[in-house]
Image (cartoon, rainbow, N blue to C red):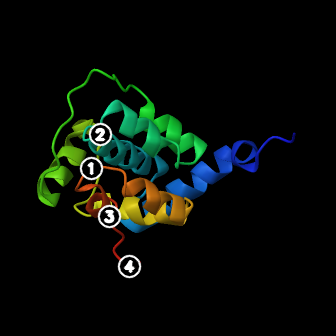
Amino acid sequence: MTVPREYTHASEDFQAFLEDAGRAAMLATSHQTYTMVDAVLQVFRRRLTPVQILIFAAVLPPCLRALFVENWHPGDPVLPFADRASLTLEVQGVRSQHNFSPDDSITAVANALHLNVDRDAFADVLNKMPEGSAAYWAESNP
């Protein structure tokens, strides 16, 4: 069996995703974009059970999958979804000294994510996630 494309091109695909997200958020550097993406993923992850985290991770490309579960502690409490403004403040609070996430950071990452995942598989997984998940990952211009 050959090595699947998603693994042989993981770095290039991750870089393309970061470029999409950075462009959507109008950020200046890949470092700023990485911090925003990490924060958006962390804030979403906090609202999932361990089983839901693994189900969601399975539809992400390899590098995003790894980022999504990095530093995750399965015993962490599951938080409820809040309004968009509160979730955005939570995103902006992750590593706040180095975080340049704009007010539309969640949408910017969502738009980039939709460009870089299997859209049907992603929609199917969102249907298995808690209420609020689909709204979290809604695109601004589907």
Instruction: Give the residue number, with chain letter if any, for mark 1.
Output: 130
Residues tagged 4 and 2 counted as in contact (Cβ below 8 A): no
- Residue sitting nearer the eye, 135 or 96: 135
Q: Helix, strand, or loop for circle 2?
A: loop
Q: Helix, strand, or loop for circle 1?
A: loop
Q: Quadrant of the C terminus?
A: bottom left
Q: Residues within 10 Å of mark 4 (few under 14, many from 20)?
A: few
**Badge 2 amino acid:** Leu
> Between marks 1 and 2, how big is the CA–CA gap?
7 Å
Residues tagged 3 and 2 counted as in contact (Cβ below 8 A): no
> Between marks 4 and 3, how big is the CA–CA gap?
10 Å
> Between marks 4 and 2, how big is the CA–CA gap?
26 Å
Q: For residue 45, say whether it is visible.
A: yes
- Residue sitting nearer the eye, 5 or 27: 5
**Badge 1 amino acid:** Pro
Instruction: Give the residue number, with chain letter if any, for mark 2.
Output: 48
Identity of the residue drawn at 38% across and 34% down: 51
> Where does the image place residue 59, in percent across and percent down from the top left?
52, 49
> Between marks 1 and 4, how big is the CA–CA gap?
23 Å
Disc nearer the start of the sequence (1/3)? 3
Instruction: Give the residue number, with chain letter if any, for mark 3.
Output: 107
- Residue sitting nearer the eye, 90 or 2: 2
**Badge 4 amino acid:** Asn
Instruction: Give the residue number, with chain letter if any, for mark 4.
Output: 141
Q: Helix, strand, or loop for circle 3?
A: helix
**Badge 3 amino acid:** Thr
**Left or right relative to 40: residue 114:** right
